[in-house]
């Protein structure tokens, strides 16, 4: 359903619009939606993490000045488009990059600078907790940060009285409620799917592990309360309203939905929260998420387990490298055309070169690429060296060159996803693609379908991103009417999106070609290893 400009203006004045805000790693983004969930205004604030004393962090001042600036930018957009001011909202929600470490004492004072997901300083804790729980605990998870601080004997640990994530912190400061949505909570500590809460058995194992330390707190006491999507999670306080809108125009009392992580909002934005669906986000990095019907048979270091915002188990394969090497080659070609006196529009170059890949041999004709700007956990690399290699008799032409680069962008993801699809026999009805890799229509989408041997869909709305997904979760809080989250998304948000959804089924030649490419890629990892060791 779409509304006229006058109808939208009235909804804003009547306080019927809903706002979602997401703290990404480089941008804080706000999306305002109408009663049907359509984006009607937006705002943003760019920010950067800092490396201080070897720790990747953001200051709390960055959080609040960035939030206020982002909100103000959104209100300017509303003023420019509709000529009105926002004084009230129907609902509100916050999300942020997941994981990390924020701990507070009994006076609610931050005990140590915020340690973000980007820090890889918890290797020992990750390894020991994975063994203790028989459950994969990645380095970026909050519990790994806490346990590493304990192993390091850090002075602040006995003073901890509350532990949360960035989304949880912002929500707490604006509502007074120490809660997390279950999807966000699943990146702090494992979730028991039967109870929808932190796993009590693993909490008991953790307590037993640290018993000799005699800390004046119990893990359950310092963790936030876990709540499901659609559950009321507090209201905006007068102090919170001032933090969000220092001008004082925004009224208190707005209901808030549970704070969520960027993984969960990405699932919502791509309508992939139902079991047997998944999504692949492909830009600078690439990760795939599949909503499972049951637990995996064993622990995989390559696979993280989180949940959807409504508590279904999700297997996540996260890879560090995707489009950076493609961009480097395109930039090189742009330099060449400029040097020859024929500068070409960069967007046109991408479209032309991506489409050239569809003219290639399905297996890339003996051309092999490794796009490792940084290491890859899934294939066992701590560092990377971008690399292209071919046999003397390879069919080396532009189409094969481009297809090898596009295959390389998906190869590590395929390695991890094959564990799910082949080893665990996970059933996948449909996967949604979003991100820059899919910008050239039909190319990245077709190659991913071949790589995963599954139908791949792309939707125009996926480009709105996590802040829109958060606004949809806030809308679900007040308009869910007893529907499950998948039902709500299908009937209320995506029912009119069918025309904007394009689905490609795998082409058998692409499936066979990618599998052949992967045989060479897997054997050739020794070449990448030699490059890292020697250069």
Image (cartoon, grey):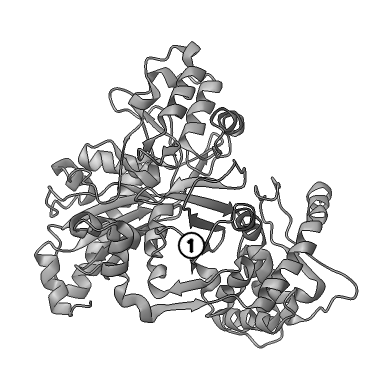
Q: Residue furthest bottom?
A: 342
Please name whichever residue, 364 or 235, is drawn nearer the observer in this view of the structure. Answer: 364
Residue 14 found in image quarter: bottom left
Q: Residue at x 37, y 67 (%)?
A: 464
Residue 417 x/y as whole percent: 60, 57
Residue visible at 47% across and 32% down? 143
Which quadrant would residue 394 be assigned to in this image? bottom right
Give the residue at mark 1: 279
Residue 440 in picture, x, y percent from top left: 54, 78
Horizontal and vertical percent for residue 444? 58, 73
Residue 524 visible in the shown view: no
Quarter of the image that includes the N terminus: bottom left
Q: Residue at x 21, y 72 (%)?
A: 80
The crowd level at tag 1 (other Cα within 10 Å; few <14, some 14-19, many 20+) is many
Q: Can you give x and y, in whole percent of width and height, for residue 364 in the image?
A: 75, 74
Q: Nearer the viewer, residue 128 or 195?
A: 195
Count the numbered circles shown: 1
Q: Is residue 474 above or below residue 456?
A: above
Splitting the image into 4 quarters, where does residue 522 fall? bottom right
- Residue 517 visible within the image: yes
277 vs 293, nearest the viewer: 293
Residue at the spot 60% in from the left edge and 30% down from the top edge: 131
Whether residue 170 sits left or right of residue 429 in the image: it is left
Looking at the rendered structure, the secondary structure element under dot 1 is strand
Please give left or right for residue 261 compared with residue 78 in the image.
right
| Horizontal arrangement in the rendering, residue 370 relative to residue 246 (left or right) | right
Tell me if 393 is positioned left or right of 210 in this view.
right
């Amino acid at each position: 359903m779409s509304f006229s400009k006058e109808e939208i203006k009235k909804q804003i004045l009547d306080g019927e619009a809903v706002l979602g805000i997401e703290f990404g790693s480089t941008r804080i983004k706000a999306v305002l939606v109408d009663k049907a969930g359509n984006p009607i205004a937006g705002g943003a604030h760019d920010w950067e993490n800092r490396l201080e004393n070897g720790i990747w962090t953001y200051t709390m001042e960055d959080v609040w000045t960035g939030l206020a600036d982002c909100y103000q930018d959104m209100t300017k957009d509303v003023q420019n488009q509709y000529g009105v001011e926002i004084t009230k909202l129907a609902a509100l929600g916050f999300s942020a990059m997941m994981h990390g470490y924020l701990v507070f004492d009994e006076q609610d004072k931050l005990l140590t600078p915020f340690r973000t997901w980007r820090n890889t300083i918890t290797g020992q804790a990750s390894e020991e907790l994975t063994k203790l729980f028989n459950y994969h605990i990645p380095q970026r998870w909050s519990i790994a940060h806490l346990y590493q601080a304990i192993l390091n004997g850090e002075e602040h640990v006995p003073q901890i009285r509350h532990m949360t994530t960035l989304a949880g912190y912002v929500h707490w400061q604006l509502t007074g409620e120490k809660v997390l949505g279950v999807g966000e909570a699943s990146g702090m500590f494992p979730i028991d799917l039967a109870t929808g809460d932190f796993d009590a058995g693993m909490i008991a194992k953790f307590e037993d592990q640290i018993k000799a330390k005699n800390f004046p707190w119990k893990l359950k006491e310092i963790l936030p309360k876990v709540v499901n999507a659609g559950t009321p999670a507090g209201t905006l306080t007068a102090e919170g309203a001032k933090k969000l809108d220092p001008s004082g125009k925004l009224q208190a009392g707005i209901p808030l939905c549970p704070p969520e992580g960027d993984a969960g909002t990405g699932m919502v934005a791509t309508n992939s929260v139902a079991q047997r669906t998944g999504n692949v986000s492909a830009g600078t990095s690439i990760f795939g998420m599949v909503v499972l019907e049951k637990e995996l048979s064993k622990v995989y270091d390559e696979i993280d387990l989180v949940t959807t915002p409504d508590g279904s188990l999700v297997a996540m394969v996260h890879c560090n490298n995707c489009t950076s090497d493609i961009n480097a080659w395109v930039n090189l070609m742009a330099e060449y055309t400029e040097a020859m006196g024929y500068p070409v529009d960069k967007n046109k170059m991408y479209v032309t070169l991506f489409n050239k890949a569809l003219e290639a041999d399905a297996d890339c004709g003996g051309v092999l690429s490794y796009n490792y700007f940084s290491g890859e956990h899934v294939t066992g690399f701590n560092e990377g060296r971008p690399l292209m290699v071919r046999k003397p008799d390879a069919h080396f032409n532009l189409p094969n060159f481009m297809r090898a680069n596009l295959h390389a962008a998906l190869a590590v993801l395929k390695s991890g996803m094959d564990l799910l699809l082949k080893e665990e026999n996970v059933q996948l009805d449909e996967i949604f693609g979003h991100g820059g890799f899919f910008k050239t229509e039909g190319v990245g989408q077709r190659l991913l379908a071949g790589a995963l041997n599954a139908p791949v869909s792309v939707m125009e709305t996926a480009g709105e991103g996590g802040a829109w997904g958060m606004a949809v979760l806030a809308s679900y809080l007040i308009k869910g009417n007893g529907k499950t989250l998948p039902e709500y998304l299908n009937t209320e948000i995506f029912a009119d999106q069918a025309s904007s959804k394009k689905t490609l089924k795998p082409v058998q030649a692409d499936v066979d070609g990618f599998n052949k490419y992967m045989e060479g890629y897997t054997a050739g990892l020794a070449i990448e290893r030699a490059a890292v060791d020697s250069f």
